[in-house]
Image (spheres, rainbow, N blue to C red):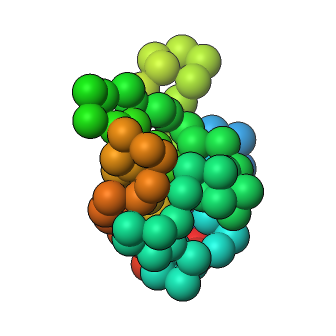
Amino acid sequence: MDSTKERMNYSKIFIALSLLLWIWGCSIGRIYVGSELKNDPKEKIKTGSTTKSEILETFGPPDRIQKQYDGDIFVYAYLRKNSSKFTIEEPYITNLTLFQYSRIQQKKDALVILFDKEGVVKNYGYQKGTPELTTF
């Protein structure tokens, strides 16, 4: 009699595990927005001497241009976002989510260049954050 009860318990466990295999999901995503800056601005930009045409030749067209009275501003931005998600749910009868885990990392590189009225670099700012992303 005990062996029959044991088989019934094992059968229930097997069925439960089989059902779980049908209702879990995992997704990994990567989003890249903008163009990666191929050149190091610290090496290519000289305040007071680098011109707009040299900037355009080195870095390409900016993502945004702001027109101002005393000169233009070029904005370059490169965004990277990595995400992963694991979900266990019952999607058919109750649409109930039993467990969900999400991990999102987002970093960006940004370059802002200020020009004077003659189109020469007055100042610039650079932040590089994308190397800090961990892979998963």
Image quarter of residue 48:
bottom left
Residue 11 locus on image (x, y percent): 68, 55
Q: Quadrant of the C terminus?
A: bottom right
**Residue 36 drawn above or below residue 136:** above
Which residue is at the far bottom? 43
User: Is residue 21 in view?
Assistant: no
Measuring 41% from the left and 58% from the top, which residue is drawn there?
121
Image quarter of residue 122:
bottom left
Measuring 57% from the left and 42% from the top, which residue is drawn there?
62
Residue 130 locus on image (x, y percent): 49, 69
Residue 8 locus on image (x, y percent): 63, 55
**Residue 61 drawn above or below residue 1:** above
Q: Quadrant of the N terminus?
A: bottom right
Name the residue nearer the viewer: 56 or 94.
56
Q: How many marks?
A: 0
Which residue is at the far left? 69
Residue 118 locus on image (x, y percent): 43, 44
Measuring 47% from the left and 46% from the top, which residue is drawn there?
119
Which residue is at the far top? 93
